[in-house]
Amino acid sequence: MKLPDKTVPMAEAVARVQDGATVMLGGFGVPGTPFLLIQELLRQGARDLTIVKNDANETGMGVDHLLAEGRVAKLITTHIGLNARAIEMMNDGRIEVEFCAQGILAERIRAGGAGLQAIVTDIGLDTELANGKAKVEVDGKPAMIETALRADAAFIHAAKADPFGNLGYAATARNFNPLMAMAADLVIAEAETVLPLGGLTPDEVHTPGPFVDHVVELAELSEEYDIVRR
């Protein structure tokens, strides 16, 4: 059986994301963030987006471009403290922000990829993070329900890929990317290098190709990637 070639132009891949979509964006600060896919999403004009990302990046990069153009309706994240615009927009009511403990965000995404509806935890139980969430008892101890997260699309950044979509990440750039690749209906991976089939050894494959719909090879990295240039 011949494996399909999933490499496509960036514009063609991103065009599948519609207004009102929920989009997961990999990355922890700069490492692993798909900056060029975000720029293409901005260029194509999708609006009223729900963005799921560990952070809101810094002012002038990544998610901030979407915020500045009013494209984001809701942000599901762990913190926005490095982005003054995101803080201002939240305080002014121009975007909705749902905060999660970092490990809980990762686990909610993992649960979505595993086909679970929710997880049960006591993390954040006595904080504002518990507001509006269902409470339960497990073995006589209080806990709350955190719903699983899935998305219409996930944008992820890989160091290496092959045409079938097998992906390898560099060091800490792995972060949320493998989880998000399992938790979205459409997965678009931008890759610094696309190797022929067989170019990645089994140990180098961190996300298997069946989870990936499109692979976009990056001709060059923009200035936003400077911190991770190797």
Image (cartoon, rainbow, N blue to C red):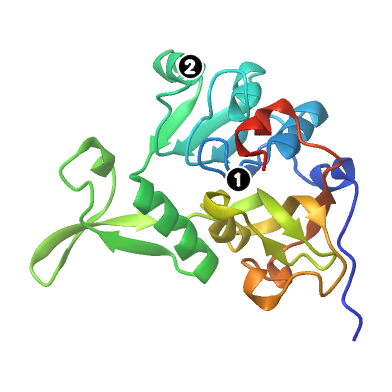
- Give the tally of numbered discs: 2
Q: Position of residue 102 (x, y in %)?
A: 37, 46
Badge 2 crowding class, 10 Å Cα cut-off, few under 14, some 14 to 19, many 20 or more, is some
**Which residue is drawn at the image coordinates 80% and 43% (left, top)?**
14
Q: Position of residue 185 (x, y in %)?
A: 67, 59
Mark 1 element type: loop
Task: Using the image as rendered, state which of residue 175 and residue 203 is in the foreground.
Answer: 203
| Left or right placement of residue 30 versus residue 34 in this view | left
Amino acid under disc 2: Met
**Which residue is drawn at the image coordinates 65% and 22% (left, top)?**
65
Q: Are marks 1 and 2 in contact (CB under 8 Å)?
A: no
- Asked if one can make out residue 100 in the rendered structure from this viewpoint, the answer is yes
Q: Position of residue 213 (x, y in %)?
A: 77, 61
Residue that carries the numbered disc 1 in the rendered image = 32
**Which residue is drawn at the image coordinates 36% and 43% (left, top)?**
100
- Asked if one can make out residue 187 in the rendered structure from this viewpoint, the answer is no
Q: Is residue 52 above or below residue 64?
A: below
Give the mark, 1 or 2, whose residue is nearer the N terminus.
Answer: 1
**Which residue is drawn at the image coordinates 22% and 46% (left, top)?**
124
Quarter containing the C terminus = top right
Residue that carries the numbered disc 2 in the rendered image = 89
Quarter containing the N terminus = bottom right
Q: Is residue 11 above or below residue 81?
A: below
Numbered tag placed on residue 128 in the rendering: none
Marks 1 and 2 sit apart, C-alpha to C-alpha, by 25 Å
Q: Position of residue 10 (x, y in %)?
A: 85, 43
Task: Using the image as rendered, state which of residue 26 and residue 50 is in the foreground.
Answer: 26
Residue with the most extreme left position: 140
Task: Using the image as rendered, state which of residue 52 and residue 9 is in the foreground.
Answer: 9
Q: Is residue 23 above or below residue 64?
A: below
Badge 1 crowding class, 10 Å Cα cut-off, few under 14, some 14 to 19, many 20 or more, is many
Task: Using the image as rendered, state which of residue 134 and residue 107 is in the foreground.
Answer: 107
